[in-house]
Image (cartoon, rainbow, N blue to C red):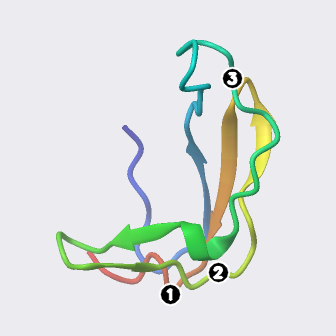
Amino acid sequence: MRFLKQSTAATVNLGPFIDDSDRKTPKTSLTVDYNSIHLSKNGGSFNVKNNTSAAEHSSGGHYLCSLSTTDTNTL
């Protein structure tokens, strides 16, 4: 588990995403746009993240997701 600093831009790791047919092959070419990423702040309702960048594949089905200071502004 990684803790985020409040009101600080951050990059978080999502995944791994794996193929649902064999449950082991990493998905390395997904399109994960910002509208697909929903955040819940302190147990609140889920909303689309504020940072408008897409998540990008890093390695082995893991994707890097950029968060803005607005995304992290709640304890």
Quick one: label 2, few (<14), some, or many (20+) residues within 10 Å?
Answer: some
**Are the residues at dot 1 and dot 2 in contact (C-beta closer than 8 Å)?**
yes
Question: Along the horizontal axis of the image, is 65 left or right of 38?
Answer: right
The N terminus is located in which quarter?
A: top left
Question: Along the horizontal axis of the image, is 75 left or right of 28?
Answer: left
Could you tell which of marks 2 and 3 lies nearer the N-terminus?
3
Quick one: label 3, few (<14), some, or many (20+) residues within 10 Å?
Answer: some
Q: Which residue is mark 1?
A: 70
Instruction: Label 3, secondary structure: give it.
Output: loop
Amino acid marked by disc 2:
Asn
Q: Which residue is mark 2?
A: 51
Quick one: label 1, few (<14), some, or many (20+) residues within 10 Å?
Answer: some
The percent coordinates of residue 26 (x first, y second) are 69, 23
Q: Which mark is residue 26?
A: 3
Could you tell which of marks 1 and 2 lies nearer the N-terminus?
2
Amino acid marked by disc 1:
Thr
**Residue at (71%, 31%) from the top-left corner?**
27
The percent coordinates of residue 12 (x first, y second) are 58, 52
